[in-house]
Amino acid sequence: MTTVVGIVLGAGSSSRLGRPKQTLPLGNSTVLGWVVRAAEQSSLDRVVLVVGGTADEVLAGLQLARTEVVHNADYGEGCATSLLAGLAGAGACDAAMLLLGDTPGLASRTIDSVREAWDERRPWGLVAEYDDGPGHPFVFSAVAFDGLRSLHGDKAVWRLLEAEDSHVQRARVRGDRPLDVDTWDDYESVRAALTPT
């Protein structure tokens, strides 16, 4: 039986939005809360949430059932530092699934589908392939962890996937990629889609 740990990257500084997007209200939770809830409702064996400089504010809006929290003191140095903190929190496992804390439209069934695809094939890396192209979540086997630990800055995971393309497989997911909340317009679009009045 394999162990797949979900790493929720929720330590971003939200520089484009101007306030912590993780804390933006969405339905009965927050933007980050939706992602954590989907992870907790999924087949992932464990869930690790990485938080950064606004940790107290971010955590105050969450109801955690089976999520372990890891603090990334170096969050300002790029997303790769959160990945490092998440891998440290994940410990020994067969694979890690990376989940973005600003994609509240990600469903637990999508997480389960991608995890099932990894379980069946166990590739070095696996990327979700939506109708409109590749996107998160990503799954990395334990053999890829050393490569992940060597990354620096933002978008480093995408660059690693491109460099290791021959070792990366795709998991087909029906529908379009869940929208990232990077701007206020993104937030309004997500709110309209997920919590219609």
Image (cartoon, rainbow, N blue to C red):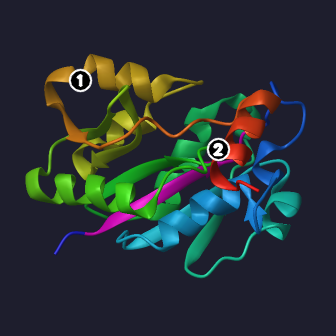
Residue type for callout 2: Asp
Residue 189 appears in the figure:
yes
- Residue 192 falls in image quadrant: top right
- Describe residue 116's horizontal placement relative to residue 139 as left or right: left
Viewer-nearest residue: 23 or 142: 23
Q: In the rendered image, which residue does mark 2 sit on?
A: 102
Task: Tell me if residue 123 comes above or below residue 8 in the rendering.
Answer: above
Please name which of the two marks, 1 or 2, marks the residue nearer to the observer: 2
Residues under labels 1 and 2: Cα distance?
A: 26 Å
User: Residue 20 appears at what percent x and percent y?
Assistant: 84, 43
Q: Earlier in the sequence, mark 1 or mark 2?
A: 2
Task: Tell me if residue 29 comes above or below residue 10 in the rendering.
Answer: below
User: Residue 75 appears at what percent x and percent y?
Assistant: 72, 40
- Describe residue 100's horizontal placement relative to residue 117 as left or right: right
User: Residue 55 appears at what percent x and percent y?
Assistant: 81, 57
Residue 183 appears in the figure:
no
Q: Of the numbered discs in the image, which one, if any, rests on residue 164?
A: 1
The stretch of residues the image draws in magenta is 3-12
Viewer-nearest residue: 65 or 142: 65
